[in-house]
Image (cartoon, rainbow, N blue to C red):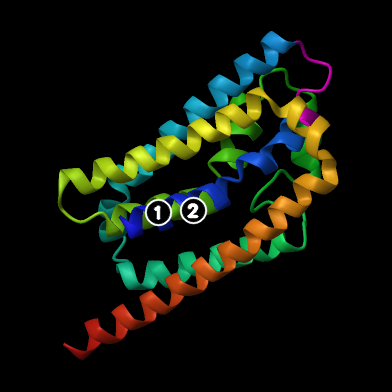
Amino acid sequence: MSSLVNLFVMLFVVIDPIGLAPMFVALTHGGSESYRRRMAFRGTVLAASVLVVFVLVGKALLHALGIGLPAFRIAGGALLFLLAIDMVFARQSGLRSTTEREQEEAEQRRDISVFPLAIPLIAGPGAITTALLMSGSAGQTVGGMLARLVVLFAVLLLALGSLLVATRIMRFMGETGANMFTRVSGVILAALAVQFILDGLVAGVVLHSR
């Protein structure tokens, strides 16, 4: 149960439903309410499809590439730690948001559901890394995999809800409030990332000592 709670916290922090609100409002500026709802639903479904694929085949992909789970835990933890730094300092980078040129391209497109909403805003590098780690740690039981998928869908539903009420969130919290929430989440993610690195190092030492 504790592992599922940790997984929920990590996915929630990485996907950052509250932090999606200001970016979604900016991307859909001038659009109708029906347009925003359509983009929110399509973007979330597409992101869910990408993440589920990585959860289901991620372990096989790592095995095919000859990458051990300890090595991926260390690399994934390092990537998540960099993401946490961006969140703590409220910096906009390609790790958790669109770059300036991507933003300009998105503003010229009417359908933002695939890019940049689904990828990289919802299913970004951090979320994909977490999905791969879920695949590697899910064990061989079907129940364990289903439990992790339920956690994933729960966080994605929260993200969808945030997108649907994004304008209300921004009206209530404002840009400063959203950034404050993101900073606190970044500190939590940094601690989880360090734990992933430590687990990877311990697993690597045990593996090589056999």
Left or right of residue 194, residue 58 in this image: left
The front one of 208 and 151 is 151
Task: Give the structural element (helix, strand or loop) at label 2.
Answer: helix
Marks 2/1 in contact by CB < 8 Å: the verdict is: yes
Task: Give the structural element (helix, strand or loop) at label 1.
Answer: helix
Left or right of residue 55, residue 125 in this image: right
Give the main secondary structure, helix, strand or loop, of the magenta stretch.
loop
Q: Identify the image quadrant of residue 130.
A: bottom left
Q: Furthest residue to the bottom? A: 209
Q: What residue is shown at x 50% (from left), y 66% (from top)?
A: 192
Quarter of the picture containing the C terminus is: bottom left
Residue located beneath label 1 in the image: 5
Residue located beneath label 2 in the image: 9
- Above or below 153: residue 190: below
Left or right of residue 97, residue 63 in this image: left
Residue 3 in picture, x, y percent from top left: 34, 59
Q: Residues within 10 Å of mark 2 (few under 14, many from 20)?
A: some
Residue 36 in picture, x, y percent from top left: 69, 17
Residue 30 in picture, x, y percent from top left: 84, 17
Residue 138 in picture, x, y percent from top left: 26, 54
The front one of 38 and 2 is 2
Q: What residue is shown at x 78% (from left), y 14% (from top)?
A: 31
- Above or below 144: residue 207: below
The front one of 150 and 120 is 150
Q: What residue is shown at x 68% (from left), y 51% (from top)?
A: 94
Q: Is residue 125 visible?
A: no
Stretch in magenta: 25-32
Residue 19: numbered disc: none
